[in-house]
Amino acid sequence: MIFLILIGAIFFIILATVRFKMHPVLSLTIAAVAAGLFLGMSPADVVKSMGEGLGKTLSGIALVIAFGSIIGIYLEKTGATQILARTILKLVGDKKSPMAINLAGFVVSIPVFCDSGFIILSRLNKALSQKSGVPVLVFAIALSTGLYAAHVFVPPTPGPLAAAAILEADLGLVLLMGLGVAIPVSLTGYLWATFSGKSLKQSAVEKKMVREEPVEALSLSPFQAFLPLLVPILLIAMKSIVNHPSYPLGEGYIFLVLDFIGNPILALLIGVFFAFGLARKVPNAKKSDWVPEALKQAGSIVLITGAGGAFGAVLRTVDIAEVFNLSSISGWGSLLIIFAIAATLKTAQGSSTVSIITTSAIVAPLLTSFGLVSEADKALVVLAIGAGAMTVSHINDSYFWVVSQFSNMEVKTALKGFTLATFIQGLTGLIALMILHLILS
């Protein structure tokens, strides 16, 4: 019966999201209430568990998501994202411009949602194609896969942030290990682009897409453009390093300062002030709605994350490992199961973020049974979920349509070029995290 209840809850989330277009906040909340009642919990206990799960999940992540969204909107509106891209293009060189656009997408997607990042940077694809002689679809696939890799693996992107909060994983460790997995996954997308992109053809009908142009930021230096992104990442990473059991920098004043400002909330807040510096020459009237727009974007992600935490809290009331006879599974086998759950949810309902949050809620009660209790293990679980949540992007994913429409691809072409790329990237991520697990075990 417990098995049927859990499967029914997951099926409801997928059906409500895909068939009836219900917002994930509502589908996750309804699933949590129904699952709790069917599992024999009293109405009072259901509400209590959901409230505790929501509060615990959001206590350390809501402001992080909000501040990350503000940084992203300022990078987008000031044109700093294009400065980042052009700087990387200049460093890598014209001969390897598809690799450069892939890496540029990777960097930009850390604070900026991948669909927004693609819309902004896709303007460069046609110019780069004309300059290098490389087909434009090579650039489109290279850019889209670079953006996608950071989107599912590297905080402060909302998905990995949410997974880390629900699973109580160390965010700095998730960041460091996520970069280690995401970089080869991104480069795999570049390799696939160079292999497949030359044989793909654009639609004969040119699609004209309207998009608000970013504010001109010609006076910004690359150093200024990178600061809002790199400073928070470095501070969060340093907090994890100084808190290593060996205490490499001791436990004195330096430790206390880095431990304090490396807290994700403070690190992202510092990044926000660097982002504000990008727009110092923009009239106040023009930038007055940027923060509200960012908070509006963040609010949806925060609520979905909270609903996922509430759903997970209800599931923790039963021993799922015993029901599914999973107590004998550990190590790479458990990571493979977690990957498969995330991939199934992603393929079925389309959203990587919803897949990450839902999978995190499902597997959180299983970590002890799987023997995944150390900080490194929890970080690997986040990465396994991320790898699954990018496998695969197809017609039920809004990002699929952004990539195809802004690249003038027919659906068949996008499935052959982009969707196959996400499948290969997901498997590459799985292999990379398995290697990490082997090294750490």
Image: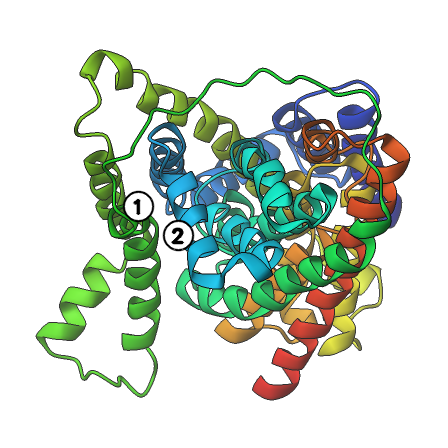
Q: Estimate how packed mark 2 is, as few (under 14), some (14 to 19) or many (20 or more) residues with alpha carbons within 10 Å.
A: some
Q: Residue 144 shows which numbered tag?
A: none
Please report the residue visible at 26 percent of the width from the left and 39 percent of the height from the top. Answer: 275
Q: Which amino acid does label 2 sit on?
A: Thr
Q: Is residue 441 visible?
A: no
Residue named by callout 1: 225
Please report the residue visible at 11 percent of the width from the left and 78 percent of the height from the top. Answer: 252
Give the x, y percent position of residue 58.
43, 41
209 is higher (above) or lower (below) than 256:
above
Q: What residue type is labelled 1?
A: Ala
Give the x, y percent position of residue 165.
48, 51
Please identify the quarter of the rendering in which residue 322 is found. bottom right
Q: Earlier in the sequence, mark 2 or mark 1?
A: 2
Give the x, y percent position of residue 16.
78, 24
The answer to which of 53 and 292 lies nearer the viewer is: 292
Q: Estimate how packed mark 1 is, as few (under 14), some (14 to 19) or many (20 or more) residues with alpha carbons within 10 Å.
A: many
Q: How far apart are marks 2 and 1 (CA)?
A: 10 Å
Please report the residue visible at 32 percent of the width from the left and 75 percent of the height from the top. Answer: 241
Please identify the quarter of the rendering in which residue 320 is found. bottom right
Give the x, y percent position of residue 209.
63, 18
- Helix, strand, or loop for circle 2? helix
Colouring of the image: rainbow
Residue named by callout 2: 87
Q: Is residue 289 visible?
A: yes
The answer to which of 270 and 368 lies nearer the viewer is: 270
- Helix, strand, or loop for circle 1? helix
- Location of the C terminus by quadrant is bottom right
The answer to which of 146 and 306 lies nearer the viewer is: 146
